Image (spheres, rainbow, N blue to C red):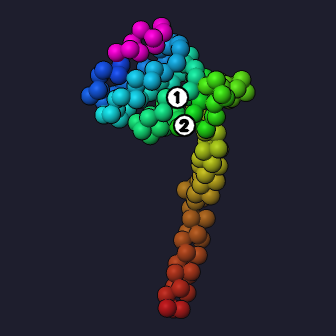
């Protein structure tokens, strides 16, 4: 489906507050008339086949870059700069494709969470299994606590 069918009338819906066209196979450019939507507080155009420069308007630049991911778009709020004709470089489009394939997973956070879980249960797990270790650990904590109290 092309955006041109509704691009002329989208700007007339001035009190529209939310648009979610994510994953709808839309093609073409984002219409300039969308900048007339002053009450728009939710916009999601991700994972379509949109291309070109994101129209400049106070509303559109306030949305997250994730609302435009999976397209060949450029300009703010995306970090991709447009060429003179408003097109995206191919390597920038490949970055969007990689992010789409990862479904937005931030592998750094996954690895940090995994390391925390393994480290935590690697330390706490034996305390649950071996009662003598638990008693020794709590005795050690009590000694440290009493020494800190005596210093104060």
Residue 110 point in image, percent of width and height: 61, 42
Residue of label 1: 54
In the image, 55 versus 1, the foreground residue is 55
Q: Mark 2 vs mark 1: which is more N-terminal? A: 1
Where does residue 30 sit, x and y in percent of width and height?
A: 48, 21
Q: Which percent across, then down, holds residue 26?
A: 50, 13
User: Residue 130, position in %: x, y?
Assistant: 60, 58
Is residue 55 visible to us here? yes
Question: Would you say the residues marked 2 and 1 are in contact, meaning their CB atoms lie under 8 Å apart?
Answer: yes
- The residues bearing labels 2 and 1 have C-alpha atoms spaced at a distance of 7 Å
Asked whether residue 48 appears in the rendered view, the answer is no
Q: Residue at x 64, y 39 (%)?
A: 107
Residue stretch rendered in magenta on the structure: 1-9
Which numbered marker is on residue 8? none
Dominant SS type (magenta): helix
Element assignment for label 1: loop
Question: Please, which residue is most extreme toward the right here?
Answer: 91
Helix, strand or loop at mark 2: loop
Mark drawn on residue 76: 2
- In this rendering, the answer to whether 124 lies above or below 26 is below
Q: Nearer the viewer, residue 64 or 84?
A: 84
Instruction: Note whether 14 is above or below 138 in the view shown.
Output: above
Asked if residue 138 is among those painted magenta in the image, a careful observer would answer no
- Quarter of the image for residue 59 reads top left
Which residue of the protein is positioned furthest toward the left in this rendering?
15
- At label 2, counting other C-alpha atoms closer than 10 Å, the crowd grade (few under 14, some 14-19, many 20 or more) is many
């Amino acid at each position: 489906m092309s955006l041109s069918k509704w691009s002329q009338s989208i700007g007339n819906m001035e009190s529209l507050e939310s648009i979610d066209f994510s994953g709808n196979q839309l093609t073409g450019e984002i219409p300039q008339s969308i900048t007339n939507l002053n009450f728009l507080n939710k916009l999601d155009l991700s994972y379509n086949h949109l291309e070109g420069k994101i129209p400049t308007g106070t509303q559109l630049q306030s949305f997250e870059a994730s609302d435009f991911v999976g397209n060949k778009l450029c300009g703010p709020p995306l970090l991709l700069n447009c060429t003179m004709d408003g097109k995206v470089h191919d390597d920038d489009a490949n970055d969007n494709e990689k992010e789409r394939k990862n479904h937005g997973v931030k592998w750094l956070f996954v690895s940090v969470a995994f390391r925390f879980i393994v480290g935590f249960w690697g330390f706490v797990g034996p305390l649950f299994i071996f009662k003598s270790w638990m008693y020794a650990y709590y005795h050690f904590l009590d000694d440290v606590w009493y020494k800190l109290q005596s210093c104060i």
